[in-house]
Image (spheres, coloured by chain):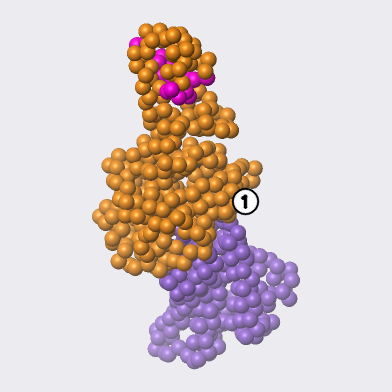
Amino acid sequence: MMALIVAEVAKVRTTRLWIGLLVGVVALGALGAIATLAIAGSPDGLEAGITPIETVENVRDFVATGSVAGLFALVLGAVATTTEQRHHTLGGTFLATPTRWPVVVAKVVGSAAAGFLFGVVGALVPLIAVAGDFALEGEIVPFGSTVVVAVLAVAAGSAFAGAIAAAAGAALRSQLIAILGVLGWALVIESLVGAILPGTVRWFPFSGLTNALSQPGGDLLSAPAAGLMMAVYLGVAVALGIAVTLSRDVD
Amino acid sequence: MSARRTDEPAIEVAGLTKRFGSITAVDGLSFGVERGRVTGFLGPNGSGKTTTMRVVLGLAAPTEGTATVMGRPYAALDRPLARVGALLESTGFHPGRTGRQHLRIAATAGGLQKERVDEVLDQVAMRDYADRRVKGYSSGMRQRLGLAAALLGDPELLVLDEPGNGLDPAGVAWLRGFLRAFADAGRTVFVSSHLLAEMAQTVDRLVVIDRGSLVREGPVQAITSAVASDVMVRSPDADRLRVALEAEGATVSVGEDPGSLTAAGVAIERVGELAAAAGVVLHLLQSREASLEEAFLRLTGRDGAGSAPGAPEMPPPPEPPA
Ligand SMILES: Nc1ncnc2c1ncn2[C@@H]1O[C@H](COP(=O)(O)OP(=O)(O)O)[C@@H](O)[C@H]1O
Ligand SMILES: [Mg+2]
């Protein structure tokens, strides 16, 4: 299994997609962070509900905006299997591992690792930005273990996004449908259903569970409960991905 | 893993049927591939060769019947790349990876030695291109990379689907020699082709299919002589002999010299008897073994002369390829 995970990580590493996505994580994160810092505390900012960053809790919440990295992890995961479908490499992959299910598991683990990396980077971008902002004023940014936990929480959420997208991708044939499907779920469906039935948000994988880790409070589940629910979602998705992978004919 | 000859076939296909919706790609096919030989898998385009190989390699599930490799379903082989090397027609590569990266990933996933990567690159003469992206490869280079991947595990069995596709004539000649040497070292090759010229000089045995069903299986010699040996005759009275031969059901063609006939579908002894019975003088009576190509065309009913004698239950001639 270790060899398969190494092989799957090598597949990601040897194509350029991950670089593009990582650049996206940094660019989008930096853009959002700088824009937020620019108006935080100003009248415009107050009107938009953006308070100045003064306390450790403010810094923690600001770091949590790095969870936008999860969107890029979703894309990377969704591509893990479907790119093999698209380039007709799945046959070669299954010749090496004809039992197939370990391939799905390795892709899920590899995508989770990549998602974790994306998440760490995604969380560090606002942290560095706010630290720089404080440094410009000759001050030191408020820091504490809660900030470190927030970085790890963002990374865990992003790892979850990569993993569940890889499992979903294993169950789908088309790369485009897989990418649009996972992004559409995270960006559109959860928002729509959440707007109609606000009580359901806490159970959603992204707006509910991953946020419960990085921005705890409100109606969201406790972190352990959220982690458990994530494991359940992931288990179901992996089982589905394996079932479809085992049942289908490959070129 | 050292190659060995045993009585157990390297590949055994039994009662295999594969349907895709309403299309029956393989239809009750049974055959065996002997160890230590090159077995050609011959059939026109669309006859089910690729589908059969995919089922043999566990990539597609049979609708009915079984296929085993080294006595087991492919999926039950331990470290399969070290036992079976395969190249399928549909095999692709990620265009953004280099040839070497592909092979290294395959070696990792297959639990194979990394040193093999350079060895197989040398074997297929691809070392100079190994660090270029596949995007820039010619079809021949892709085919060589696919062969390199098949050889990676130093397997005892090679399953190759139309390996000559995309190779230039020198490449095809190299491939023939390579397959010959591979089998002469006691290993097994199962190679499909729709091109006869590629096959004739390389293979020991043939499995001939058409429309998903077995047409013939056996040594090349036996198939060509049983199915397609012609009888050449020269006679001053060729017209009368032709009438007698045609009455016997033979297919007769007249040579450039009107006294020369070539008869197919009739034994040489019978030609002699018919000539004697008709009181026709013969100046020449000689059998001529047909080429594999002629044998194949007759076996598959594609020679324009209808079914070949001795080939039971021939399907009707095909509609021309689209
Ligand atoms: N995945 C598939 N879906 C539908 N039809 C298929 C599929 N694969 C092969 N076929 C059909 O099965 C028949 C046999 O195809 P194939 O095995 O590729 O033949 P060959 O390799 O001898 O040219 C053809 O009619 C082909 O169109
Ligand atoms: Mg084919």
Give how far across and how far down residue A166 sits, in percent. Answer: 54, 67
Quadrant location of the N terminus of chain B in the rendered image: bottom left
Q: Answer whether residue B264 is magenta in the image.
A: yes
Q: Foreground: A75 or B272?
A: B272
Please say whether residue B255 is visible from this viewpoint: no
Residue lying at 53% horizontally and 25% vertically, measured from the top left? B306
Q: Secondary structure at mark 1?
A: strand
Question: Which chain is in purple here?
Answer: A
**What residue is drawn where x is 44% and y is 13%?**
B276
Name the colour assigned to chain B in the rendering: orange
Q: Which residue is mark 1?
A: B64
Residue A219 placement (x, y as % from top left): 69, 82
Q: Is residue B216 left or right of residue B255?
A: right
Q: Image point 31% across, 58% down: which residue?
A: B120
Amino acid type shown at disc 1: Glu
The magenta span reads B249-269
- Chain letter of mark 1 equals B
Q: Residue B6, percent across and down?
A: 42, 57
Query: Which residue, as the protein is rendered here, is positioned at the far left?
Result: B128
Asked if residue B139 lies in the magenta stretch, the reply is no
Confirm whether residue B257 shows in the render: yes
Residue at 53% x, 79% y: name it: A156
Q: Residue A241 is drawn in which quadrant?
A: bottom right
